[in-house]
Amino acid sequence: MSKDVYILAVSQISVQEPLTLDWLDDPLRPSGRYAPCREPDFRPFFTPMQARRMGPLFKRAAAVSRKVVEEAGTGCPEGIFTGAGLGCIANTWDFLESMCTAGEEALSPTLFMQSTHNTVGSMIAMDAGCHGYNCTYSQDGISFESAMLDAFLQICGDMIGNALAGVHEELPERLAAFVGKGAGGPCEYPLSEGSAALMLSGSVPEGKKAMCRLSDVRILHRPSNLDEVVSAYGASSVLGNDFFYSLFGRSFCSSGLGACAAAGMVASGRVPSVLLVNVSGPDAGLVFLEKA
């Protein structure tokens, strides 16, 4: 692609210190069987009434999305691209449980309406006042790369000027045992959850500075020559699943959280380029970041 695409801002809520990348100098290493998010103070983002009506996943997604839009200085995003491997699994579980206990009678529609995968992307759009393109990808461990690829191609094709891309997963402890191996990855890393948002743009607003350049996004299905493909990028640093899981635990959003960390590493001058390689089942997602 000949058009430059930049990452203007990133934000994350995970097992690390939320809504910042200051932890990169001294990150936590999650351990055990389950590692929940470190919740930030949501009071700057929501009124008490708003907070009461929103579940943890919605609050996290809205907070990181608001933060990157504000920091990027692009105004309302022209497109919203969301990855959600499990979707609103807590609401889905509660809805199914109520069906069993209530005999499929007198069910509350709220849990059903807020249990679909695209609920998060819709909520982000309403919160941001975005009436443009909105798409959710629920491709398990490759959901983040699917959302990023769509956003990347649309900016490169001049279909939109900027994009809010993110991946959002929740995993209450009561469901961790049920999800089990579904999140993928070796079992020495704990199951986890998180939210990540990245503001992409085909240009850098006046007075702002890009964190890094998003040079390429690819998804390969059953690649027979992955090592050759990775080597051809010539990246100064190649970060894979062990990197994601060691910092954020195992979840379908781990690679998205890793992308936030990698953007911070490039922006701070730690490395000039990073190739993120996320292997999930038969697929491999590649995200290449370079110094802007």
Image: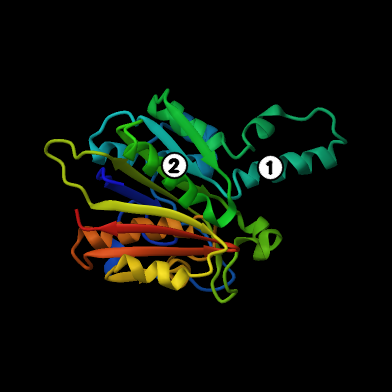
Picture colour scheme: rainbow
Query: How far from the left and from the top, in percent, is residue 37?
Result: 48, 57
Q: Residue at x 31, y 42 (%)?
A: 200
Disc 2 target residue: 150
37 sits left or right of 163 in the view: right
- Quadrant for residue 273, please give it: bottom left
| Labels 2 and 1: the sequence-earlier one | 1
Query: How far from the left and from the top, in percent, is residue 24?
Result: 30, 66
| Residue 257 in view of the camera | yes
Q: What element carries label 1?
A: helix
268 sits left or right of 110 in the view: left
Res. 143 mark: none
How many residues crowd around disc 2 within 10 Å: few (fewer than 14), some, or many (20 or more)?
A: some
Query: How far from the left and from the top, in percent, is residue 96?
Result: 76, 42
Type of the residue with mark 2: Asp
> In front: 43, or 243?
243
Can you say whether 76 is above or below 163 in the image? Answer: above
Type of the residue with mark 1: Thr
| Residue 21 in view of the camera | no
Q: Which residue is drawn at 68% across and 42% down?
A: 92
Q: Residue at x 47, y 69 (%)?
A: 226
- Quadrant for residue 110, please give it: top right
Disc 1 target residue: 92
Query: How far from the left and from the top, in percent, is residue 39?
Result: 44, 52
119 sits left or right of 5 in the view: right
How far apart, in angstroms, are the residues tagged by discs 2 and 1? 27 Å
Q: Residue at x 55, y 57 (%)?
A: 141
Image label count: 2
Q: What element carries label 2?
A: helix
| Outermost residue to the left | 207
| Outermost residue to the right | 103
